[in-house]
Image (cartoon, rainbow, N blue to C red):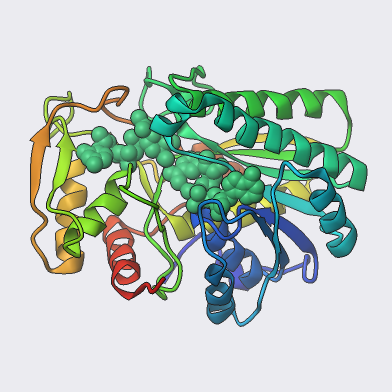
């Protein structure tokens, strides 16, 4: 099946045996990106403090790819761990996923969020400077667009943050722009993800939220297996076709492969580069459409009730993907049904 315009496995892999450091690599997006990187011929070192993930993910990545990534259990805010990791593994690029991402928690614990997301990123950049490594791929978010003024959302859209989590993403984006302006040689990609969902088709890795999921699809999956009664649909009076919120859901493997493309782009450019690009599908789907697709994937009814809007939610959001297609040559092709089928396989096969 066509995944991207060119299959990753068919690339002329000129980077074989290059080593990359993946922070947050046992987490949801980092683990899938590790699989995609290994398939493209990279050696991967994962650094994760296991705050929101499990060490068994490393075993499952090895089962999928046949290659075990190196694993360092450590914190990105710890300069000594970073220095020793750079010394031992000599990576030539960093993909930085480590961070915290729950909007509500960030409002309750802003200092924890600034410390982890901003201080963590700055500490990593300092360690990279010291090790003379200057290729950095950063996990930003469509949250930096706030309430969209236009759809689809282009990268040039004005940026605003409505919560501390969003502010941490804005601050790190700015830190990266300042660093890139101040010091020649940096190759930086700021990737703005829309709504990553789904799982690896093997069912061996996926999203494993702790406690009650904040996000729609993990919640729907838990209702489907009977772990929760029903989905609470936050509002059906938005100005959208069926009144429920519309988002740009992207399969996590399309997102993962987008990272490989972004890394390739940074490595291949002749001079320094500051790339800012959306990673989405360019399509919006409503909450009710997602529930229906999950019913199909699971062959089970998914009970739901309409409740009040969630404070801070926007009506609709989807990406302008032209820049991703033009610069990275990538276009997400997995469907909503693929996302739900793979999430369902993961939900029903996972053992923790
Ligand atoms: P995740 O929680 O599954 O993964 C993050 C990983 O980072 C976890 O394994 C966690 O243990 C680790 N980690 C956290 N703090 C750390 C620290 N100080 N040192 C070392 N490891 C640490 O989250 P995810 O969904 O994979 O998100 C990855 C990145 O993408 C985050 O930066 C997030 O803000 C960003 N992002 C996620 C989404 C989304 O919907 N999932 C959307 C936009 C952006
Ligand atoms: C949320 C965050 C965003 C963050 C992203 C990924 C908020 C306001 N936004 O995005 O900053 O980058 O997660 O972590 O928290 N929904 C329900 N019932 C539910 C859960 C969600 O109806 O139980 C609806 C929401 O109203 C929305 C859609 O489903 O319309 C998607 O919600 P969600 O998965 O939480 O993602 P975002 O709100 O887009």
Horizontal and vertical percent position of residue 50: 58, 56
Q: How many marks?
A: 0
Q: Is residue 154 left or right of residue 340?
A: right
Residue placed most toward the observer, 120 or 233 = 120
Is residue 98 visible from the viewing direction of this image? no
Could you say which quadrant of the image residue 305 lies in? top left
Q: Is residue 82 left or right of residue 24?
A: right
Residue placed most toward the observer, 272 or 53 = 53
* Ligand 2 position by quadrant: top left
Horizontal and vertical percent position of residue 319: 42, 36
Residue displayed at 39% across by 53% down: 209
Residue placed most toward the observer, 8 or 299 = 299
Check the picture and name the quadrant holding the C terminus: bottom left
345 above or below 249? below
281 above or below 336? above
Check the picture and name the quadrant holding the N terminus: bottom left
Is residue 41 visible from the viewing direction of this image? yes
Residue displayed at 17% across by 47% down: 289
156 above or below 5? above
Q: Is residue 226 left or right of residue 168?
A: left
Horizontal and vertical percent position of residue 172: 65, 29
Residue displayed at 56% across by 31% down: 113
Horizontal and vertical percent position of residue 208: 41, 58
Could you say which quadrant of the image residue 178 lies in? top right
Q: Is residue 320 left or right of residue 114?
A: left
Residue displayed at 78% across by 66% down: 14
221 above or below 151? below
């Amino acid at each position: 099946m066509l995944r991207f315009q060119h299959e990753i496995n068919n690339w002329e892999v000129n980077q074989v045996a290059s080593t990359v450091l993946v922070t947050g690599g046992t987490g949801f997006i980092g683990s899938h990106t590790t699989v995609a990187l290994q398939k493209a011929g990279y050696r991967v070192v994962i650094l994760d403090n296991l705050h929101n993930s499990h060490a068994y993910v490393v075993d499952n990545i090895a089962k999928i790819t046949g290659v075990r990534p190196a694993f360092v259990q450590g914190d990105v805010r710890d300069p000594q761990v970073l220095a020793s990791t750079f010394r031992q593994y000599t990576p030539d690029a960093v993909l930085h996923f480590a961070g915290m991402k729950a909007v509500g928690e960030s409002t309750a614990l802003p200092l924890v969020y600034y410390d982890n997301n901003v201080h963590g990123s700055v500490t990593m950049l300092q360690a990279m400077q010291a090790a003379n490594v200057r290729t950095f791929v950063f996990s930003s978010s469509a949250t930096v667009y706030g309430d969209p003024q236009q759809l689809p959302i282009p990268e040039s859209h004005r940026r605003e943050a409505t919560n501390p989590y969003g502010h941490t993403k804005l601050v790190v984006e700015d830190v990266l722009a300042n660093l890139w302006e101040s010091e020649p040689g940096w190759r930086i990609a700021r990737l703005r993800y829309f709504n990553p969902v789904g799982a690896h088709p093997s069912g061996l890795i996926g999203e494993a939220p702790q406690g009650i999921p904040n996000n729609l699809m993990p919640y729907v999956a838990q209702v489907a297996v009977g772990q929760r009664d029903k989905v609470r649909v936050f509002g059906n009076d938005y100005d959208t076709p069926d009144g429920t919120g519309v988002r740009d859901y992207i399969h996590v493997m399309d997102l993962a492969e987008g990272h490989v493309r972004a890394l390739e782009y940074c490595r291949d450019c002749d001079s320094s580069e500051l790339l800012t690009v959306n990673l989405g599908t360019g399509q919006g789907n409503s909450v009710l459409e997602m529930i229906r697709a999950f019913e199909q994937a699971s062959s089970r009814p998914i009970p739901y009730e309409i409740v009040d809007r969630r404070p801070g939610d926007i009506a609709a959001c989807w990406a302008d993907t032209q820049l991703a297609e033009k610069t990275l040559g990538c276009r997400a092709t997995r469907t909503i049904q693929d996302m739900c089928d793979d999430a369902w396989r993961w939900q029903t096969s996972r053992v923790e």
